[in-house]
Image (cartoon, rainbow, N blue to C red):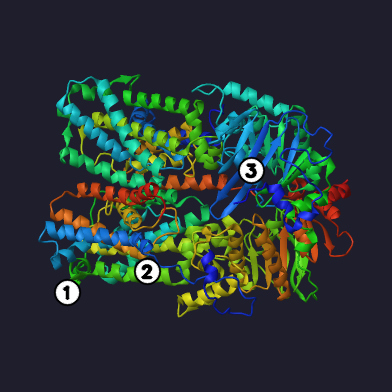
């Protein structure tokens, strides 16, 4: 603190008694701060994944292979963006996969009746939005933890899909609708629509979260919901909006997934909620709220997506890949804690 | 490195000449040297206790003793180190330096269990109990009778006996959440007794009690005293200290500045010791013409918390709200601020009816509320100074839809400098600042909303003396700048030093309102009203 | 110490009774002894797992890895049986419990020592445990024919027509009840869940309590794994997929608070029984079994909403009582 007094004082903005010391505008930039940022760790992890895979498989860097692999994670990644905001404000939505099932059911049934693709898309988005709003209402009105509410709505939404569909599958879709999910939206470089949507949304989310007043308010809610409310932030309104948004994104993911696989069963997207939460947590968004970046989530999406792709190129079964991803999740959270504990504070 | 004891240090301060006491060495009676001060050997002796936290020296070379059958009052302002003493004695903090002696044995408490084992039990300031568990379990958690299997019959029997001993009228099986605050305190006392404690620490036990309940507590204190327990009694209220204590020890800024027999000391002397200078000097003198009415409140009521609150507030006026903790003052203010809805009543702001459905409405209308609980309601500790300062006024920094960092920085620099916030840089996390500087940032956040009415709820609670003076000066400046200020405080000198008028609340109702220099403007009258003495007389 | 059942448990029991009577009237086939035996036998796993989950939730935690633990332990035990079909039953019981306990200790260790949020830890171990089945078993399933007679004997034993699995669940329930009401570590779970700071003041170690909770959860899941595989006569990767959520649902319906510190053995058993009844009643009532999920979802939501109403934080009640009454009448 003493060295502060030695710095030249800057002109005060208003006529004041001259301050005894000057407070710097910005934190001193230190290399260790940059290196210890979660995003830096993720970039290193991503580089390791890419280099490792390139060395192990000649097919990894093939442009079309890479494009095709984005199909496997783009839908989840889209939902992860909404989940990131929810976890940032200390909430969670475990019902997203069930919302997808319900939205996919709506799309599939309407398609079976010959409804046109634009309406199918609207139906998917609408069902998602509605389900999300139900979650939001229940969470903000009852004050019950969202993990409990969304476990309930998860059963409810998927249950409704099961009741309606039984053991049937919906398999008739207009070709123009299937084309959304099964052909490249841009041919060079080959880019599927779902990946393009993810990229655009990631930029939008990043800009809103890190550049606007709403984003700042979300950080404040996550860091201290009570103080946020005292500061005039309409906490419940924002929470409701985030759950609705999460539902809408699940609806969008359902539209893309249905178009890609061309079949809807009640167990569609089963277990996705845990994959999505893994993406977000690995992305550095703290379960305890108030900490996280969209960049981190995007990097985590790529780390998980490319690691999965690389391992599958090496014929590692999907469930074994899950072991590695589970370990990655635990180790990436545990390692910084262990390092900090053994080497003191950085 | 300071080598002299706390008391000597006080003597060399500017205020030292005010102290009527001198002393040769530790544990020598201060007064009436030929009268026996200590009826027997001390049960507990602290010597040379020091404790530091990052950035704060909480205790510095503190030493005193507790004697069986005596109540020792530990006095000092908020932040003087009283709670740190309690936590040191109960094994929650490990002191950096110094020794604890229980009986003849030197002790080293590394956990609360060690403190219990040594016969020290505490009734904490914030109740540390289990709402969902029964009275018996709250008393015996941590030292249940029986071996691996709990002997519930024995626990119940002993609980019943303990409750009978302190004349408590509830059952061992009752869940704690069904009890009143006063009854919960009884449970804590029973818990202390269950440890066969030789030393019982009471950390502001009367803060949330009604006057009747306080009398009840004193009865128990007298009883414990008669049974030979040593009691360390911590309180801000001098009437209580003079009522129950035999001896006193005074702390200021983490150092002991005096001790002695209660019967030999007068209140003004203690106040001077606590504060370190005559009380009058603290507060800025203001000679202002009070302006036009800004806020009018009529018959504001809530079904369970307060009723029929009415007052007017004018520009350049400081209106004090005084009362005991739990008198309903914060509830009234939070209602005005839109945190809760009144069941009845009318609020007029600048001549127009005003209804706040949420704090956002109140902020938009020009009301700012600096909450009582800084840690939970005021500060967002993980965020930086800049982010905290602009949090309630983000709209002012939006350019083309985005937040402008430059605009935020300019506002932060301006307000932070004006409030003399001490920090390394404006991006520093609020959690890294001292309590006083956190409070300054919280106040800055509210000033950034450009309010017409500023409500400050216990603005100096738990902050150091230096920051306190800065906040006091600043409250005066706010009024000079033409704002209307409501000051809610439990510290009488603060309210009387700053406010133009004082409204006294008791049990959710306004008992009286006094104007500076008018009838009833005396500490005795205001305290009497706040403790319900007046009120009960009127009711009877 | 406590009354046998709280008010809300009596209500839940009443609802279950009304349901049983109602279903029996609509579908007389339901009201037979055989059905009740079937319901209890079927729900036995849920009884055990829900009790173990409750112990974790009491500490403000959650264990999402229980179903994966069950599947992994079941597979490992089955593989041992495949190679040594003549081992006595007790070996399988002990072995599965120990394996499950080990897996639970991994969760507990990460939660207690590193204080990583339990949902993150058990989300990770959920994937790891489930995947290890393939890594260790090579993705093949173990059929009942290869497990040996001893291995599959236990679930076939019955007492009063009820299977041994049910009686094991009863034993576990009694043990849980004794543990949670009569022992210091058991009460410590409530203390840390109710108020971690106060528990620390009372000398109760949070980490130790967490370790105990996850260890119990793991051990019960492991034992269930053996019983599950022995009962259904097959061990494969997808056993009990998603069962963790049913288990948590049983707790929530039974009045266990996700916020920690609140929950009872009786309530949890009733919550599990409720789900078990629905699962078994639907086919009898000729309702498509697909309704099961939707109904349990709706019930969870109803249960927590009613709970939230009942437990809404009361005001501070500052006004003297007489004034409060007056204000209420006036308003």
Residue C84 in the image, given as x and y percentages of width and height: 16, 24
Residue A187: mark: 1
> Circle 3 — which element?
helix
Residue A206: mark: 2
Q: Is circle 1 on the same chain as circle 3?
A: no
Q: Evaluate if marks 1 and 3 touch, with contact meaning CB atoms under 8 Å apart.
A: no
Q: Evaluate if marks 2 and 3 touch, with contact meaning CB atoms under 8 Å apart.
A: no
| Left or right relative to C117: residue B527 | right
Residue B376 in the image, given as x and y percentages of width and height: 57, 55
Residue A294 in the image, given as x and y percentages of width and height: 36, 64
Residue B85: mark: 3
Q: Is circle 2 on the same chain as circle 3?
A: no
Nearer-N-terminus badge (1/2): 1
> Circle 2 — which element?
helix
Please give the chain letter of the residue carrying mark 2: A
Q: Nearer the viewer, mark 2 or mark 3?
A: 3
Please give the chain letter of the residue carrying mark 3: B
Q: How many marks?
A: 3
Indicate whether B308 appears above or below B396. above
Residue A63, located in which quarter of the rendered image? bottom left
């Amino acid at each position: 603190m003493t060295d502060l007094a030695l710095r030249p004082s800057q002109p005060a903005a208003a006529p004041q008694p001259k301050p005894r010391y000057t407070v710097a505008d910005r934190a001193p930039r230190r290399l260790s701060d940059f290196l210890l940022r979660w995003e830096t760790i993720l970039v290193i992890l991503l580089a390791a994944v890419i280099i490792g895979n390139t060395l192990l498989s000649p097919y990894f860097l093939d442009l079309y292979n890479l494009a095709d692999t984005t199909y496997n994670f783009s839908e989840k990644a889209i939902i992860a963006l909404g989940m990131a905001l929810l976890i940032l404000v200390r909430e969670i939505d475990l019902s997203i996969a069930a919302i997808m099932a319900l939205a996919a059911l709506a799309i599939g049934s309407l398609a079976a009746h010959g409804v046109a693709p634009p309406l199918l898309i609207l139906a998917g988005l609408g069902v998602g939005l509605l389900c999300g709003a139900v979650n939001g209402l229940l969470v903000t009105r009852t004050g019950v933890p969202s993990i409990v509410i969304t476990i309930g709505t998860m059963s409810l939404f998927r249950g409704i899909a099961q009741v309606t569909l039984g053991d049937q599958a919906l398999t008739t879709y207009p070709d123009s609708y299937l084309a959304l999910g099964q052909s490249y939206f841009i041919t060079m470089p080959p880019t599927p629509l779902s990946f393009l949507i993810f990229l655009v949304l990631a930029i939008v989310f990043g800009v809103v979260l890190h550049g606007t007043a709403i984003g700042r308010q979300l950080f404040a809610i996550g860091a201290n919901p009570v103080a946020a409310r005292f500061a005039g932030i309409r906490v419940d309104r924002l929470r409701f909006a985030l759950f609705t948004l999460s539902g809408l994104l699940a609806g969008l993911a359902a539209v893309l997934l249905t178009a890609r696989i061309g079949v809807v069963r009640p167990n569609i997207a089963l277990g996705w909620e845990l994959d999505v939460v893994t993406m977000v947590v690995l992305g550095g968004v703290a379960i305890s709220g108030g900490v996280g970046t969209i960049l981190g989530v995007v990097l985590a999406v790529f780390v998980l997506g490319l690691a999965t792709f690389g391992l599958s190129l090496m014929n590692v079964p999907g469930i074994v890949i899950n072991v590695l991803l589970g370990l990655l999740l635990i180790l990436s959270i545990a390692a910084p804690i262990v390092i900090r504990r053994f080497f003191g504070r950085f | 490195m300071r080598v002299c004891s706390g008391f000597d240090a006080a003597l060399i301060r500017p205020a030292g000449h005010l102290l009527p006491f001198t002393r040769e060495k530790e544990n020598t009676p201060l007064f009436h040297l030929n009268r026996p001060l200590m009826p027997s050997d001390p049960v507990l002796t602290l010597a040379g206790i020091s404790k530091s936290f990052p950035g704060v020296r909480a205790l510095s070379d503190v030493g005193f003793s507790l004697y069986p059958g005596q109540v020792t009052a530990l006095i000092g302002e908020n932040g003087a180190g009283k709670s740190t003493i309690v936590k040191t004695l109960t094994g929650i903090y490990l002191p950096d330096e110094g020794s604890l002696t229980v009986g003849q044995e030197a002790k080293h408490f590394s956990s609360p269990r060690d403190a219990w084992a040594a016969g020290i039990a505490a009734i904490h300031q914030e109740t540390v109990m289990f709402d969902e568990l029964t009275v018996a379990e709250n008393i015996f958690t941590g030292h249940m009778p029986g071996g691996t299997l709990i002997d519930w019959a024995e626990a119940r029997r002993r609980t019943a006996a303990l409750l009978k001993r302190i004349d408590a009228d509830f059952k061992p099986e009752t869940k704690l959440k069904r009890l009143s605050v006063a009854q919960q305190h009884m449970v804590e006392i029973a818990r202390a007794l269950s440890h066969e404690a030789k030393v019982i620490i009471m950390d502001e036990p009367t803060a949330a009690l009604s006057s009747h309940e306080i009398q009840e507590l004193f009865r128990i204190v007298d009883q414990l005293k008669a049974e030979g327990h040593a009691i360390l009694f911590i309180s801000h209220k001098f009437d209580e200290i003079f009522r129950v204590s035999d001896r006193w020890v005074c702390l200021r800024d983490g150092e002991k500045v005096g001790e002695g027999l209660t019967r030999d000391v007068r209140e003004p002397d203690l106040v001077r010791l606590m504060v370190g200078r005559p009380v009058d000097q603290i507060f800025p003198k203001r000679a202002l013409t009070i302006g036009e009415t800004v806020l009018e409140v009529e018959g504001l009521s809530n079904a369970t918390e307060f009723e029929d609150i009415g007052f007017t507030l004018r520009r350049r006026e400081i209106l004090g709200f005084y009362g005991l903790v739990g008198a309903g003052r914060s509830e009234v203010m939070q209602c005005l601020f839109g945190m809760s809805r009144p069941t009845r009543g009318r609020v007029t702001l600048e001549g127009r009816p005003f209804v706040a459905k949420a704090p956002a409405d109140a902020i938009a209308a020009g009301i700012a509320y600096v909450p009582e609980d800084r840690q939970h309601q005021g500060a967002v500790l993980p965020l930086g100074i800049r982010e905290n300062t602009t949090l309630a006024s983000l709209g002012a920094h939006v350019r083309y839809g985005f937040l402008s960092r430059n605009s935020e920085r300019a506002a932060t620099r301006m307000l932070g400098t004006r409030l003399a916030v001490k920090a390394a840089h404006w991006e520093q996390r609020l959690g890294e600042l001292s309590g006083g500087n956190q409070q300054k940032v919280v106040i800055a956040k509210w000033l950034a909303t450009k309010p017409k009415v500023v409500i400050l709820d216990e603005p100096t609670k738990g902050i150091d003396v230096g920051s306190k003076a800065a906040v006091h000066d600043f409250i005066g400046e706010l009024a000079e700048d033409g704002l209307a200020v409501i000051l809610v405080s439990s510290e009488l000198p603060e309210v009387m030093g700053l406010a133009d008028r004082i409204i006294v609340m008791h049990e959710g109702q306004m008992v009286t309102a006094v104007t500076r220099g008018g009838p009833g403007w005396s500490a005795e009258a205001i305290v009497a009203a706040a403790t319900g003495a007046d009120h009960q007389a009127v009711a009877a | 110490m406590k009354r046998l059942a709280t008010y809300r448990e009596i209500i839940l029991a009443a609802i279950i009774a009304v349901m049983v009577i109602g279903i029996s009237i609509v579908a007389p086939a339901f009201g037979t002894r055989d059905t009740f035996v079937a319901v209890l036998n079927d729900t036995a796993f849920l009884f055990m797992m829900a009790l173990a989950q409750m112990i974790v939730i009491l500490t403000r935690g959650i264990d999402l890895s229980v179903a994966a633990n069950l599947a992994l332990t079941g597979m490992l035990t089955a593989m041992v049986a495949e190679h040594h079909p003549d081992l006595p039953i007790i070996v399988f019981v002990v072995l599965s419990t120990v394996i499950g306990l080990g897996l639970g200790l991994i969760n507990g260790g990460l939660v207690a020592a590193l204080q990583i949020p339990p949902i993150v830890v058990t989300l990770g171990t959920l994937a790891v445990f489930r995947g290890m089945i393939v890594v260790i078993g090579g993705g093949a399933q173990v059929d009942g024919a290869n497990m040996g007679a001893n291995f599959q004997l236990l679930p076939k034993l019955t007492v009063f027509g009820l299977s041994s699995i049910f009686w094991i669940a009863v034993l576990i329930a009694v043990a849980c009840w004794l543990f949670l009401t009569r022992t210091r570590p058991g009460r410590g779970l409530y203390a840390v869940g109710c108020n971690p700071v106060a528990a620390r003041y009372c000398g109760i170690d949070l980490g130790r309590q967490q370790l105990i909770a996850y260890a119990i959860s793991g051990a019960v899941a492991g034992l269930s794994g053996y019983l599950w595989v022995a009962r259904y006569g097959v061990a494969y990767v997808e056993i009990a997929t998603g069962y963790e959520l049913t288990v948590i649902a049983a707790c929530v319906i039974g009045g266990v608070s996700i916020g920690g510190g609140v929950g009872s053995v009786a309530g949890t058993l009733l919550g599990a029984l409720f789900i078990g009844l629905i699962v078994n009643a639907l086919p009898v009532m000729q309702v498509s079994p697909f309704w099961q999920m939707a109904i349990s979802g709706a019930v969870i939501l109803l249960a927590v909403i009613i709970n939230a109403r009942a437990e809404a934080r009361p005001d501070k009640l500052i006004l003297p009582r007489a004034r409060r009454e007056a204000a209420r009448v006036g308003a």
